[in-house]
Each structure stands twice: as structure tokens, then as C-alpha cells.
Amino acid sequence: MWLDGMQRALGGEADSDVPCGGCTACCTSSQFVHIEPDEVGTLRRIPAPLLFPAPRMPKGNVLLGHDENGHCPMLVDDECSIYEARPRTCRVYDCRVFPATGVELDDEAKLAIARRARRWRFDHPAAIDQLEHDAVRAAATFIREHEDLLPEGAAPTNATQHAVLAIRMHDAFVDPDETGPFN
Ligand code: SF4
């Protein structure tokens, strides 16, 4: 199900399986794309002047910025010009985390992502799927209402971090009374 795919991508085990269908909203929304030092193939493909050191991160971590229109400079004719070597950040990005968690993406520069994300619908073929989705939303609500209870440094600083944290934490919110051998 979609949640398994999302978790595998967030865990670095697989690329995101989001069916973009030609949508480039995340490439045109003023994003700073983080690239880690081990992404050698990616770094080789991006002109050095387009990269700058990532603030508050160890040496070697860089960000790929955007042009004055908020477009990634590697987007050419509405397609990623380095698709097969695109950064890990792009590989795991999944705009479905917003509607899945109920977290609103309210940054004006990212409205195109928010608009596209609102169109996603989720299926729940088995009872456990609905339970897990409820747990994802409960985790997002908990994070919103009890940020002070999170470990130091764990509180999200933007909507994406909030949604991703809810996906990561949702296991703790699955109601044990509702899970059983037939779920
Ligand atoms: S590197 Fe490619 S996939 Fe990533 S934001 Fe730029 S154009 Fe989009």
C-alpha cells in the first residue's frame, strides 16, 4: 500500500513511487535541494556554481538552489535534465505526505505542490490500512498539539518535516485494541 512505499522511500530503501505523471510542481516551487557528500554521480552532473554549502550541516553537504522564478536550474523543457542522476532528496520526495497526514503546506511559494497534493486519494483495502492511516493523522495532530513533549531538536520547523515525522512516528499511534489476526 502507499504507506509502505512512503516509508521505504523515507528510510532510503527505495525511490519514491509517487506517479508524478508529468507534474513538475516540486521542481518549480523554490525548493533548496539538499545533496549529501556521497552523491558523487549527482554532484558530477551539476555545475559547481549552482551549489552552495548547506547551512548547519557537516562540510560536503550542499544545496542546489533555484532561479528567480523558483525553478530548479536542472529542469529543462519541463523535464529533469539529470533524471537518472537526480539528487536523493528528489528521489524520495513524495507530496502525498501532506494529504496523508492532513498537514497543510501553507508556504506561498509551494502552492503548486499543495494544489497537486490535494488531489491524491488513498485506498484502504484491508482494515489495518485504515487503522494505519488513522494513526498517521493522529501522529500529525499529536506533533501539532504537543510539540513541547518531543525530544530536544526533534520538533519540525516546516510543514514537510511535520508530515514526514508523522509518517515516521505513526506506529506508536496504532490502536492495539483494533489490531488483530483478521485486520
Ligand atoms: S534535480 Fe531534477 S528532480 Fe530534482 S528538483 Fe531539480 S529538476 Fe526536479
Image (tube, rainbow, N blue to C red):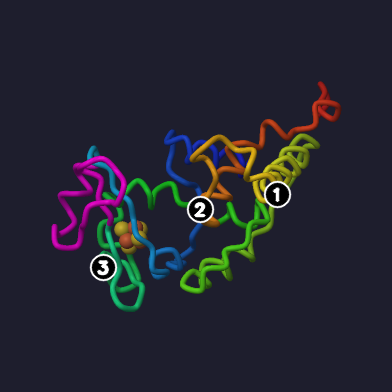
Residue to which mark 1 is pinned: 145
Pick whichever of labels 3 and 1 is earlier in the sequence. 3
Residue drawn at 66 percent across, 37 percent down? 170
Residue farthest top in this picture: 181
Q: Position of residue 72 (x, y in %)?
A: 31, 67
Range of the magenta residues? 39-63
Question: Mark 2 highlights which residue?
Answer: 157
Could you tell me which quadrant the N terminus lies in? top right
What amino acid type is highlighted by mark number 3? Pro
Q: Secondary structure at mark 2?
A: loop
Q: Is residue 44 magenta?
A: yes
- Label 3 close to label 2 by CB (< 8 Å): no
Q: Is residue 133 left or right of residue 51?
A: right
Give the amino acid type for the residue marked by disc 2 in the picture.
Thr
What crowding class fits label 2: few (fewer than 14 Cα within 10 Å), some (14-19), or many (20 or more)? few
Q: Between 125 and 135, which is closer to the camera in this rendering?
A: 135
Alpha-carbon distance for marks 3 and 1?
Answer: 38 Å
Nearest to N terminus: mark 3 or mark 2: 3
